[in-house]
Image (cartoon, grey):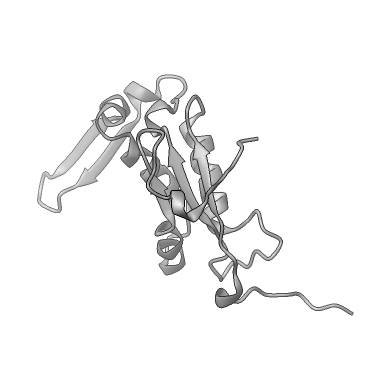
Amino acid sequence: MTTTQFAKAQEVERKWYVIDAAGVSLGRVAAEAARLLRGKHKPIFTPNVDTGDFVIIVNVEKTLLTGKKLDNKMYRWHSGYPGGLKELTYRVLMSKTPEKAMEHAVKGMLPHNKLGAQMYKKFKVYKGSEHPHQAQKPEVWNMK
C-alpha cells in the first residue's frame, strides 16, 4: 500500500514563467497565472503548502475584455470615510494602469488568507514587453 506524498515548503523547487498577455482575454490570463502561482500544474500540489512558481505577465496593456465590459464593468474601492466610494470603468482603468486590472483579477483568484498573500508576492506584472527578471532565466508559458 502506498501513502500519499505531501510537499514540504522547503523542498519545493520554484521556476520562473513569463506569460505574454497580448491579444488574450484578461480573465484567461489571470486564471492561468493563478493556477501557476498556486502550483496546481505540479504533481506535488498540496493545498496547504505554497508549491507554486513565480509568474511574470508582460504586455498587459494589450489584453482584451470581451463584450461591453470596458464600459459596464467597474473597479470600485472605498477610502474609509463616509461617502468615500470611488469607482472607475475598466476603459479608464485599462488606459491609465492596466497592471492594476490584472493584479486585481489574479488576487481575487488566489486563496484569501496568509497562504494566498504569500503566493501573491511571487507575481509580477509589466505594461510593456520588457521585464527586469532576465537573471532568473524565466521560461515562456504558452497559453493553451
Judge left or right: residue 89 versus residue 118.
left
Residue drawn 67% across the image and 58% down it: 42
Of residue 8 and residue 85, the one placed in the foreground of this image is 8
Quarter in which the C terminus is drawn:
top right
Report the label total: 0
Quarter in which the N terminus is drawn:
bottom right
Residue 15 in view of the camera:
yes
Residue drawn 57% across the image and 50% down it: 35
Q: From the top left corner, tell me how far across and down residue 4 is, in percent.
A: 76, 75
Judge left or right: residue 75 versus residue 46.
left
Q: From the top left corner, tell me how far across and down residue 134 is, in percent.
A: 45, 48
> Which residue occupies the extreme right position in the image?
1
Residue drawn 39% across the image and 43% down it: 131
Vertical placement of residue 75 versus 65, above or below: below
> Which residue occupies the extreme front position in the image?
135
Residue drawn 15% across the image and 49% down it: 79
Of residue 67 and residue 19, the one placed in the foreground of this image is 19
Judge left or right: residue 39 versus residue 81.
right
Vertical placement of residue 126 versus 93, above or below: below
Residue 108 in view of the camera:
no
Vertical placement of residue 46 versus 56, above or below: below
Vertical placement of residue 50 versus 137, above or below: below
Q: From the top left corner, tell me how far across and down residue 7 is, in percent.
A: 64, 73
Quadrant of res 68: top left
